[in-house]
Each structure stands twice: as structure tokens, then as C-alpha cells.
Amino acid sequence: MRARAVGARAVLVELGDVDEAWAWHAALVAGRDGGRLPAVEEIVPGARTVLLDGVESPPAVVAELATWEVTVGETPAPGPLVEIATVYDGEDLPWVAEQWGVDVEGAVAEHSGTDLRAAFCGFAPGFAYLVGLPPPRHLPRRATPRPRVPAGAVAVAGEYTAIYPTASPGGWHLIGRTDAVLWDPGRPRPALIAPGDRVCFVPVGP
């Protein structure tokens, strides 16, 4: 772990992988809520970082975090469950199934039966990176990205599953689609999926 001040009012905690980042995110949230940390306005997880924003004294927080010991693998309290009705008819689904060593029905059953968790958000508003697929199911991104992936596309790449909230270029493997609205500024919580949420993909007919 390396913590360093960034800007006048933020601290960036740099970590080794998404599991370590998630463990530190949970510990930092608990530390803030329990009063162990000085005032922090926002705690934002990333793939290998956690950003503490709105910090009154970044050097004091850096010094405090140097004394922390965080155990990777401890399970934080489960977040809300978000169910995503999904039509599994993605263009890359047969290829994904082949790489996984199963048929299409088996790939759908595995993906929809996996307990996924939103580790962090990025790339575009509402784009949540979901973890939980076991290492044998991790696939490299496409060699050639598509110039346009439609909104609502369900895709996998690396260790992640995600849903494209809007049409955009993308290099992930498309396995399905959903009508769920991932980002709506008019909602009390604009993002349908936030870090910590549990996510379940529910297969439905076309």
C-alpha cells in the first residue's frame, strides 16, 4: 500500500489489485463512519486505488494510513441486490462459451448464476465494473474494438462483467442485452449500480 497526497484536499491510496482495493475501500468507509479518519467527503474505489476526496489535511491522513493494517479477503457487509433482466443473445456469446469449454446454455447458466459485486465505476456515467467470475472465466479484450456498442449491451472482459449505459466504442465481448437504465440524473441515485451493490443477471426471453 502507498498513500500520497494529490492536490490540496485529496489522498490517493495505491494498491496491488481489485481485491486489495476493495478491502481498503471497506476499511476506509468504516474508519470514516467510526470516526477513526478525519473528515472525508467522499471515498471512491478504483481497480487498484482508493481516492479520499475532501480531506482537510492530506499529510495527516497519509500519516494515519501508514499505521493501518487491512486484511484482504474479509467480506464487507453485502450491499443492495440489483437484478438485471437480460436477453442472452450477444454476438460474442458462442465464442465466449467455446473459450469457457461449455455450450451456450452452459455459459448463460454460469454467468447468470454467478454472485457478482460492483467493485467500482468508471469509463462512462453508470458503467459499473462487476467482479465475481472465477479466473478460468477471465478473457482478454477483443483484439479490435468495435466502433459502436449499443446501450444496454452486457459484456465481459478480463475479470469483469459490465453493462454499457450508452452507445460507445468498446472492446469487450458482447453476451447479451438489457433494457435497464444504468444512468438517470433524475433519480435520487442516478447510477442503477453503485460500488458495493450485488448484481444478479436474470435470463429472459427476447
Image (cartoon, rainbow, N blue to C red):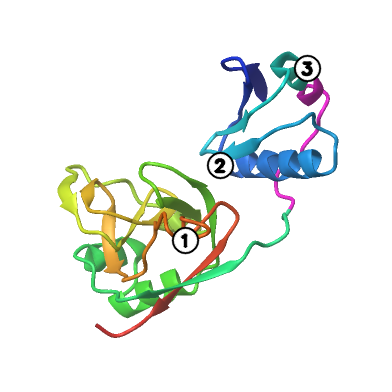
Residue at image location 68% in from the left, 62% down from the top: 78
| Residue 143 image point, x, y percent | 20, 42
In the rendered image, residue 36 lying in the magenta stretch gets the answer no
| Residue 204 image point, x, y percent | 34, 83
Q: Quadrant of residue 63?
A: top right
Residue at image location 64% in from the left, 28% down from the top: 54
Residue depth check, mark 3 versus mark 1: number of the one nearer the observer: 1
Name the kind of residue labelled 1 in the image.
Arg
| Quadrant the N terminus occupies | top right
| Quadrant the C terminus occupies | bottom left
Name the kind of residue labelled 2 in the image.
Val
- The residue to which callout 1 is attached is 187
Whole-number angstrom distance, CA of label 3 to CA of label 1: 36 Å
Quick one: label 3, few (<14), some, or many (20+) residues within 10 Å?
few
Principal SS element in the magenta part? loop
Quick one: label 1, few (<14), some, or many (20+) residues within 10 Å?
few
| Residue 84 image point, x, y percent | 43, 72
Which segment is the magenta one?
64-74
- The residue to which callout 3 is attached is 60
Whole-number angstrom distance, CA of label 2 to CA of label 1: 28 Å
SS at circle 2: helix
| Residues under numbered marks 3 and 1 in contact, where contact means CB atoms less than 8 Å apart | no
| Residue 131 image point, x, y percent | 51, 54
- The residue to which callout 2 is attached is 18
